[in-house]
């Protein structure tokens, strides 16, 4: 690669970095699914066995986990009052070239009876949170709280209503960011607001093999909806800093070369 191509690559890297600097919610989206009803996906059809819109991965999901629509937007919901899990295969090693930090994003509409809670999960062997949830975020409309968890251990809790834009009757956007290279949970956002007070280093040695969501059984009026699932991968911020430093050196070198004519 000649120096001009390197410089061009550096400039592209700068543009890319500027798109996610300061947040783990962006990066390279490697898996996404808006649950659009199209083709074989019809209202009422099973999420399980269908392919995500981006990433080429196939959903594994509870038999009660179905696609639904309100006429303007399409989403995932359930048709029985049972626990519901949906997940796709995700391993950090498969995306080494993209970085170490992965972020699950998901919109959840929490309409339901008392007792309901939902979760975003980085899991091993599926996403049943307390047994397989390496790093997971529990959201309870009933108690009005969120909890950051690893298996059955609570790491941090907070109030959903501390986020001004939180809606108890509509969709809220949640993200959970995990860096498996140092077993550290590095971020939680609710409607774009960073709510985590610190990073959490986990003692687990289990690797993540799945990313997805879970819903606890919540009674006959439960109408919880899931929308806009995604997994993004970005470099650690320290790596980003090194990249920015490297690009600065390249640009400085170019400018010096130019000034020498
Ligand atoms: Ca949708």
Image (tube, rainbow, N blue to C red):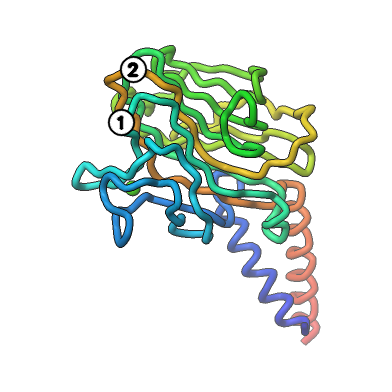
**Cα distance between the residues tagged 2 and 1:** 19 Å
In the image, residue 64 lies at what x, y percent?
Answer: 37, 35
Reply above or below: 97 against 33: below
In the image, residue 250 lies at what x, y percent?
Answer: 77, 70
Q: Earlier in the sequence, mark 2 or mark 1?
A: 1
Q: Is mark 1 within 8 Å of ligand 1?
A: no
- The answer to which of 192 and 18 lies nearer the viewer is 192
The residue under the point 47% across, 24% down is 139
Q: Is mark 2 within 8 Å of ligand 1?
A: no
**Residue denoted by label 2:** 219
Quadrant of residue 252 within the rendered picture: bottom right
Reply above or below: 4 against 181: below
The residue under the point 46% across, 55% down is 52
Judged left or right of residue 87, residue 149 is: right
Location of the N terminus by quadrant is: bottom right
The residue under the point 40% across, 38% down is 63
**Residue denoted by label 1:** 170
Quadrant of residue 16 within the rendered picture: bottom right
Q: Kindly give the residue lying farthest to the front in the view shown.
A: 63
Location of the C terminus by quadrant is: bottom right
Secondary structure at numbered mark 2: loop
- The answer to which of 162 and 145 lies nearer the viewer is 145
Q: Kindly give the residue lying farthest to the left in the view shown.
A: 71
Judged left or right of residue 87, residue 82 is: left
Q: Is residue 23 visible?
A: no
């Amino acid at each position: 690669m000649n120096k001009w191509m390197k410089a061009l690559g550096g400039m592209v890297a700068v543009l890319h970095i500027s798109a996610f600097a300061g947040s783990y919610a962006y990066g390279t989206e490697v898996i996404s699914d808006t649950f659009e009803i199209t083709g074989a996906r019809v209202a009422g059809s099973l999420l399980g066995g269908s392919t995500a819109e981006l990433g080429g991965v196939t959903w594994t999901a509870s038999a009660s986990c179905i696609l639904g629509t309100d006429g303007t937007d399409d989403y995932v919901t359930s048709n029985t009052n049972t626990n519901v899990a949906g997940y796709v295969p995700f391993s950090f090693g498969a995306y080494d070239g993209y970085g170490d930090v992965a972020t699950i994003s998901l919109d959840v509409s929490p309409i339901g009876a008392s007792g309901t809670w939902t979760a975003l999960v980085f899991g091993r062997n599926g996403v049943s949170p307390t047994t397989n949830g390496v790093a997971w975020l529990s959201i309870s409309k009933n108690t009005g709280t969120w909890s950051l968890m690893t298996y059955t251990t609570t790491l941090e809790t907070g109030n959903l209503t501390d986020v001004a834009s939180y809606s108890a009757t509509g969709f809220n956007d949640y993200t959970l960011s995990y860096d498996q290279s140092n077993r550290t949970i590095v971020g939680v956002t609710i409607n774009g607001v960073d709510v985590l007070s610190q990073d959490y280093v986990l003692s687990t040695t289990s690797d993540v093999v799945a990313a997805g969501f879970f819903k606890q059984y919540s009674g006959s009026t439960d109408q919880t909806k899931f929308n806009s699932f995604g997994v993004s991968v970005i470099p650690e911020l320290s790596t980003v800093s090194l990249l920015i430093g490297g690009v600065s050196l390249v640009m400085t070198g170019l400018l010096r070369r130019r000034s020498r004519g």
